Amino acid sequence: MHSIKSLTLDELAGRFADLGEPAYRARQVIEWLYRKRVGRFGEMTNLPAALREKLSAEFDEQPLEVACRTGSDDTTRKFLFRLRDGQMVETVLIPASPALYGEASDRRTICISSQVGCAYGCKFCASGLDGWKRNLDAGEIVDQFLRVEGESGERINNIVFMGMGEPLANYDHLLRAIGILNAPWGAGVGARHITVSTSGLVPRIRDLADQPLSIRLAISLHGATDEVRDRIMPVNKRYPLAELLEACRYFRGRKKQKLTFEFILIKGVNDSLAQAGELGRITTRLDAKVNVIPYNTVEGLSWERPSERVQDAFMEELRRGGAVATIRREKGHDIAAACGQLRLRTLADETAETGGSTRGSEKPVAADAGVN
Ligand code: SAH
Ligand code: SF4
C-alpha cells in the first residue's frame, strides 16, 4: 500500500478519476493534508463516508509513528520515527538561532533522513555503522516534515537533507519528495530553503544541476586532498576529488548559487594547516563557502575533535586567502552529526530487551528524553 503523501496533486487527481471520483475531491484531500494538516481520512469531514473508507483501503495514511522524542522548545529536538516495516529513522528540528549558514535569522530548520542506514560507510559517521537497510519512499520523507511540524507546533521554513543516509543515492524519491515539499499546494517551502547534502555522488550532482528547481547543494568534503579523503570516505575512491570539484563547477555554472562545503575537523586526520590552506584554495576557486564543524564523537568510534587552539589556527589559515568560512561550535554543533546515533542506541536497547544485545548497558533513550 502506498502513502498518499508520495503523490502529487495531479497524480492524486488521476487516481481519483480511476476510482470514479471528481478531481475537486483530490484537491480537498490535498487541502486536508497540507493546509489543515489532518492526515487521517476519517477526520476529513467534507468527504463522503464511502469515499473515506475507499481511501483508507487504498492508501497508507500514517507512514510514520513517533517512537521517541528528545529536547525541549528552545533546544534542538530530535524525533525518532518508526516506519511501517518497523525500521527507524531520525529527524531533527533546529531552533531559530544557530543558523546553519551563519546568517542571523528566524529560520527553523528540519534535518531530514533519506534512507535507513547508509551504504557509503564514511569512517567517522554513525549512520553507516549498521550498513544500509533501505531507501525511504517520498511519502516517508514528506511525512517527516509534516509530523515534526505537527508535533512541535512550529512552522518550519528551512529543510536540510543531512539526516541519515545519502540523499543522492535515493535520487528519484528525493526529488519527488522535494517537489511535494516545494509545491504551492504542498508544504510550500521555497527551493532556496532546501539543501541537499552529499558525500560526493558525481553523476547525481550533475543530474541535480540539470533539474529545474534551484535547490541548494552542500558537499561533505572533510578532506582537501585525495590522500585525506581516501582515508575516511570510501566514496572518494570511486569519485576522486578532481572529478567531484569538476561536478561542483558544473552545478555552480547551472545554478548560479553558492555551494557549501562541509568540513568536520577530526584530530590528526584533516586538521593541519596544509589542509586548511588547500581547502581555502578550493573554496575560493569555486566561490563556495565552508562550514567547519568540530567532530562530534560517536560511540564505538575512536575519532576525536581537535583542541580549540588547533581549530582557531585552522580557521585563520583557511580565511587567509579570502575564503568565506564559519565554524559551528554552539550547542547545535552536533545536529547533523548526531543523526543516526539515537537510532543506533534505541535499536541496541530493543535488542537488549529481547535478550540479544551486547550493548544493553546503555541508557534507554526514553529515559534521557524526559518527554512523552
Ligand atoms: N550522506 C550525506 C548527508 C548526511 S550526513 C552526506 O554525507 O553529506 C550529514 C553531515 O553530517 C555530513 O556532512 C556528515 O559528514 C556529517 N557527519 C557525520 N558524522 C559526523 C560526526 N560524527 N561529527 C560531525 N559531523 C558528522
Ligand atoms: Fe553516509 Fe553521509 Fe554518513 Fe557518509 S557521512 S556514511 S555518506 S550519511
Image (cartoon, rainbow, N blue to C red):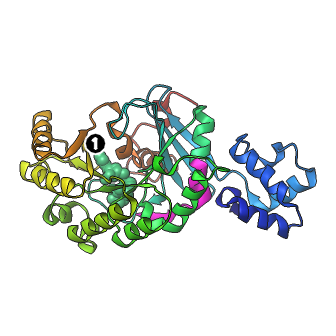
Magenta extent: 129-144
Q: Of 152 and 366, which appears nearest the observer? A: 152
Q: Of 3 and 371, which appears nearest the observer? A: 3
Circle 1 SS class: loop
Q: Is mark 1 within 8 Å of ligand 1?
A: yes
Q: Position of residue 14 (x, y in %)?
A: 78, 67
Pointer 1 local density, CA inside 10 Å: few below 14, some 14–19, many at least 20: many
Is 369 situated above or below 267? above
Q: Amino acid at mark 1?
A: Asn
Is 366 situated above or below 177? above
Would you name the residue on which mark 1 appears? 296
Q: Is residue 354 left or right of residue 314?
A: right
Q: Position of residue 41 (x, y in %)?
A: 80, 49
Is 368 situated above or below 13? above
Q: Position of residue 69 (x, y in %)?
A: 53, 36
Q: Of 175 and 188, which appears nearest the observer? A: 188
Q: Position of residue 220 (x, y in %)?
A: 30, 56
